[in-house]
């Protein structure tokens, strides 16, 4: 911030999907003295965004985003939160969207990374600077090391390395940010359904995992795709991830250090300890915790 700059002149607009991430980022920005305006996507964002200056939008309200963000002095932009990709028939195009229709059409086709990169290019072509949630709230980033009382064993570490290899191989094809591995056997790979639904499938597939936490087996591994656009859609975990991993009979969760965001960190770690799971941040070069 330059001398004499105000919070409004360094404002931040947040395009908000579902979950607690948008409010977490908004609180961090406000704590840094920045003006915040949240654009809540109807049907995705929760009512908690209304504690901040906000506007409700539908898919296709591009003109509204551009005009309000400029009026609010919000030249920086964060795009966070869970959103189901809309079908073209669901788009409610305002005039701003109609005038930029070739860009908009590209948002409903293609892999996640190509679509998200296109969204960033569009807003930056309009004079905005898109930044990552972790740039506003750096405490969200998972570091290295074991976060829980339980630690991964030798077999767990082998599963973690295989999971990282799977994410790297499939991520190059713009597929998934997570895998579940048990005893060197790949149980599931994340696709369009997301991590929670993938874990629901694993609850039926994991023949090693038992209700007895001493007999749990398998690891949920999460990490960014190779070459992923880091300003949008870094993989995220939170307390709900722990509950689903425990229900799937897994032994723990491994996060690629510096590539995964942790929501509600204290609650996340507490939930893992209570469930008897380990959580570890791993070096993606070595696959081992430090």
Image (tube, helix red, strand yellow):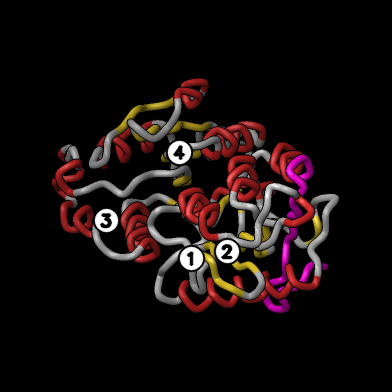
Residue count near mark 4 (Cα–Cα under 10 Å), binned few <14, some 14–19, many ≥20 = many
Residue farthest along the top direction in this orientation: 51
Instruction: For residue 191, say whether it is visible.
Output: yes
Q: From the image, tell me which residue sits under label 1.
A: 189
Q: Which quadrant of the rendered structure holds the C terminus?
A: bottom right
Say whether residue 224 is left or right of residue 239: left
Looking at the image, which is closer to me, 90 or 187? 187
Of the two numbered discs 4 and 3 in the rendering, the one whose residue sits closer to the viewer: 3
Residue count near mark 3 (Cα–Cα under 10 Å), binned few <14, some 14–19, many ≥20 = many
Mark 4 to mark 3 CA distance (whole Å) = 20 Å
Residue farthest along the right direction in this orientation: 149
Q: Earlier in the sequence, mark 2 or mark 1?
A: 2
Q: From the image, tell me which residue sits under label 4.
A: 13
Q: From the image, tell me which residue sits under label 2.
A: 180
Magenta span covers which residues? Answer: 273-290
Q: Earlier in the sequence, mark 1 or mark 4?
A: 4
Mark 3 to mark 1 CA distance (whole Å) = 24 Å
Say whether residue 274 is left or right of residue 193: right
Q: Which quadrant of the rendered structure holds the N terminus?
A: top right
Magenta stretch contains residue 282: yes
Q: Does the CB distance between marks 2 and 1 fall below 8 Å?
A: yes
Q: From the image, tell me which residue sits under label 3.
A: 107
Of the two numbered discs 3 and 2 in the rendering, the one whose residue sits closer to the viewer: 2
Under tag 2, what secondary structure?
A: strand
């Amino acid at each position: 911030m330059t001398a004499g700059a105000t919070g409004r002149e360094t404002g931040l607009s947040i395009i908000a999907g579902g979950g607690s991430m948008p409010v977490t980022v908004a609180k961090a920005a406000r704590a840094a003295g920045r003006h915040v305006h949240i654009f809540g996507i109807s049907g995705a964002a929760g009512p908690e965004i209304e504690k901040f200056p906000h506007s409700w939008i539908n898919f296709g309200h591009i003109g509204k985003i551009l005009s309000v963000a400029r009026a609010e002095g919000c030249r920086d932009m964060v795009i966070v939160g869970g959103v189901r990709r809309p079908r073209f028939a669901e788009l409610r195009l305002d005039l701003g969207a109609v005038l930029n229709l070739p860009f908009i059409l590209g948002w409903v086709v293609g892999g996640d990374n190509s679509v998200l990169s296109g969204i960033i290019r569009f807003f930056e072509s309009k004079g905005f600077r898109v930044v990552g949630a972790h740039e506003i709230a750096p405490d969200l980033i998972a570091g290295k090391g074991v976060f829980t009382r339980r630690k991964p064993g030798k077999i767990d570490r082998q599963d973690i390395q295989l999971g990282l290899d799977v994410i790297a191989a499939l991520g190059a094809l713009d597929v998934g940010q997570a895998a579940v591995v048990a005893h060197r056997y790949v149980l599931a790979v994340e696709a369009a359904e997301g991590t929670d639904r993938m874990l629901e499938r694993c609850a039926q597939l994991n023949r090693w995992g038992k209700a007895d936490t001493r007999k749990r087996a398998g690891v949920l591994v999460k990490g960014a795709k190779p070459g992923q656009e880091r300003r949008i859609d870094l993989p995220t975990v939170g307390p709900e991830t722990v509950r689903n991993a425990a229900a799937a009979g897994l032994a723990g969760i491994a996060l690629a250090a510096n590539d995964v965001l942790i929501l509600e960190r204290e609650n996340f770690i507490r939930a893992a300890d209570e469930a008897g799971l380990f959580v570890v941040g791993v070096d993606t070069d070595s696959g081992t915790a430090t």
